[in-house]
């Protein structure tokens, strides 16, 4: 909070009185008389037509702050159930736990809902990566997801290569058979004096609000095509190494603090014909590289036991809801969600047990308070976000709302109000990216105003990609991605081996769940659906 709390005069149809809303507390500001409109903040005055239920906000705060279950939920999803690679037994076990927990909280229609068919599932059983000479080193490494196992134990002297694309193939043709290939050079020196954890500054938040051009990705296709192009390049390299008969591949982590277990060039569920591959911690990879460059006699030994399974080729999202009660708009839907799947080297606490737990906790709060929303409030925990096409959320959108390729819309498209996504680590929600939806700004500004003291008041017209709101936006539905404090997400935990519950911040998770619960409630209670942007143009080649 900065300076004195903002004050706004808002008429409350829920309580039948006029309420003076203070950002620092609701109950203390309730009055039965006329409110002092002259004290209103600009943001609140501009959106005073929106009806704010201050009593409900106070109850949501009390439940979410004093009786929270959000941290325990995040720990259960992450450290207790472990990695949740899409399609794996770990994913299904955790998803079944979440479904059962939501049902125990009283949510309606708690279910695992199929979104479509997936590729082969992959299970990691065991692995080892060691340097035996010139000295012993138990290497810090992780198999790449969906990597086939080795043919027993592989030993040998590594060969250094630099293969970035097709033009590099000719240099190494005929030289890699039976070899352990190290692809990549030493790291660029990094600034070790930057703080690994931080919050968004006032200047950064103000800059976000002042943006006037939403920018890219303007469409789903702009967002996804880059992934697919990178994946195609990656596959050509994998195919080359396989055809050349390489025994194994080692690649350096691109994260200086931990093993980066995946990047946007390895999102594939079909590496059955590829070379067994490992990501190696930067310091170990560079140490071996220096030894090889100085012609020391390096000897590596590695093994990988993994298996592909396809006992059930369906993919599943976890879905639950609080049914709408209004005879006119009860079939309309307000949604919150975040992805449930992870990579294989850690428990996915900040990416994205945090967002999943916030969504579950928001629903728990509302159900515990016995709300009877006009519209249906629905939650979804998505499968397959970590692959290139947002498998779970896109499958859900295609089944319920429409196909963005030919822009063929389904009847429920007209019954959708808004989707809110949480997927940027443990940091508290500071606001939302509007995805170019300028008409939504005054509405969300009004609903966020009571949480200005919690730091949740920033709205940016910007488009944001790379997560599960994009499939909703791809068919013209209002979809908003959360602005969150970065904490140490990118420097340390995002897609890395460090992503365990140690990095969760309970107070931040509580704040996010409270803000989300209030937002869902108020949008479900509005007279009208959230405004929409123009329908995107169809794409000629559907996928």
Image (cartoon, grey):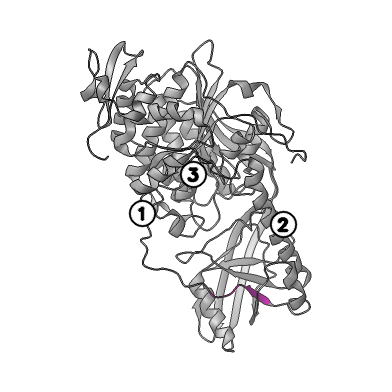
Comes first in the chain, label 2 or label 1: 1
Comes first in the chain, label 3 or label 2: 2
For disc 3, the neighbor class at 10 Å (few under 14, some 14 to 19, many from 20) is many
* Residue 382 figure quarter: top right
- Is 184 included in the stretch rendered in magenta? yes
Q: Is residue 177 visible?
A: no
- Is 15 above or below relative to 237? above
Question: Mark 3 highlights which residue?
Answer: 423
Left or right: 513 in relation to 344: left
Question: Mark 1 highlights which residue?
Answer: 198
SS class of the residue under badge 3? loop
Horizontal and vertical percent position of residue 54: 31, 22
* Residue 491 figure quarter: bottom left
- In space, the residues marked 1 and 3 are separated at their CA atoms by 17 Å
Residue range (magenta): 180-186
- In space, the residues marked 3 and 2 are separated at their CA atoms by 26 Å
Question: Mark 2 highlights which residue?
Answer: 232
Horizontal and vertical percent position of residue 242: 75, 68
Image quadrant holding the C terminus, namely top right
């Amino acid at each position: 909070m900065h300076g004195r709390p903002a004050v706004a005069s808002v008429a409350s149809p829920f309580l039948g009185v006029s309420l003076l809303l203070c950002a620092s507390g609701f109950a203390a500001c309730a009055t039965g008389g006329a409110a002092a409109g002259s004290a209103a903040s600009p943001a609140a005055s501009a959106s005073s037509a929106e009806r704010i239920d201050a009593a409900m906000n106070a109850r949501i705060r009390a439940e979410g702050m004093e009786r929270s279950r959000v941290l325990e939920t995040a720990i259960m999803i992450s450290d207790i159930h472990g990695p949740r690679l899409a399609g794996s037994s770990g994913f299904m076990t955790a998803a079944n736990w979440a479904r059962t927990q939501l049902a125990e909280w009283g949510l309606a229609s708690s279910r695992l809902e199929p979104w479509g068919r997936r590729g082969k599932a992959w299970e990691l059983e065991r692995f080892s990566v060691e340097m035996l000479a010139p000295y012993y080193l138990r290497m810090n490494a992780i198999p790449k997801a969906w990597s086939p196992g080795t043919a027993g134990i592989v030993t040998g002297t590594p060969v250094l290569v630099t293969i970035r694309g097709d033009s590099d193939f000719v240099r190494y043709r005929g030289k890699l058979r039976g070899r352990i290939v190290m692809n990549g050079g030493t790291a660029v020196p990094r600034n070790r004096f930057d703080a690994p954890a931080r919050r968004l500054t006032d200047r950064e938040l103000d800059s976000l609000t002042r943006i006037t051009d939403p920018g890219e990705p303007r469409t789903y296709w702009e967002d996804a095509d880059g992934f697919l192009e990178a994946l195609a390049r990656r596959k050509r390299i994998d195919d080359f190494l396989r055809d050349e008969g390489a025994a194994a591949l080692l690649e350096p982590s691109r994260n200086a603090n931990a093993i980066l277990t995946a990047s946007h060039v390895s999102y594939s569920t079909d590496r059955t014909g590829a070379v067994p591959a490992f990501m190696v911690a930067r310091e170990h990879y560079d140490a071996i590289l220096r030894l090889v460059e100085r012609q020391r006699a390096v000897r590596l030994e590695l093994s990988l036991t993994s298996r592909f399974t396809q006992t059930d080729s369906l993919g599943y999202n976890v879905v639950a809801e609080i049914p709408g009660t209004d005879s006119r708009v009860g079939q309309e839907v307000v949604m919150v969600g975040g992805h449930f799947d992870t990579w294989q080297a850690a428990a996915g606490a900040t990416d994205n047990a945090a967002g999943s737990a916030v969504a579950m906790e928001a629903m728990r709060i509302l159900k515990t308070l016995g709300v009877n929303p006009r519209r249906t409030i629905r939650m979804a925990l998505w499968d397959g976000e970590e692959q290139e096409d947002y498998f779970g959320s896109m499958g859900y959108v295609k089944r319920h709302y429409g196909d963005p390729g030919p822009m063929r819309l389904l009847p429920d498209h007209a019954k959708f109000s808004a989707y809110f996504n949480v997927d940027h680590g443990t940091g508290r929600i500071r606001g939302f990216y509007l995805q170019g939806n300028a008409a939504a700004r005054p509405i969300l500004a009004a609903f966020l105003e009571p949480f200005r003291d919690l730091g949740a008041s920033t709205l940016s017209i910007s488009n944001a990609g790379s997560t599960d709101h994009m499939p909703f936006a791809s068919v013209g539905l209002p979809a908003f991605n959360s602005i969150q404090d970065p904490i140490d997400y990118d420097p340390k935990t995002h897609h890395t081996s460090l992503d365990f519950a140690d990095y969760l911040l309970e107070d931040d998770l509580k704040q996010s769940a409270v803000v989300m619960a209030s937002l869902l409630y108020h949008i479900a209670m509005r007279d009208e659906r959230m405004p929409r942007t123009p329908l995107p143009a169809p794409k000629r080649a559907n996928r």
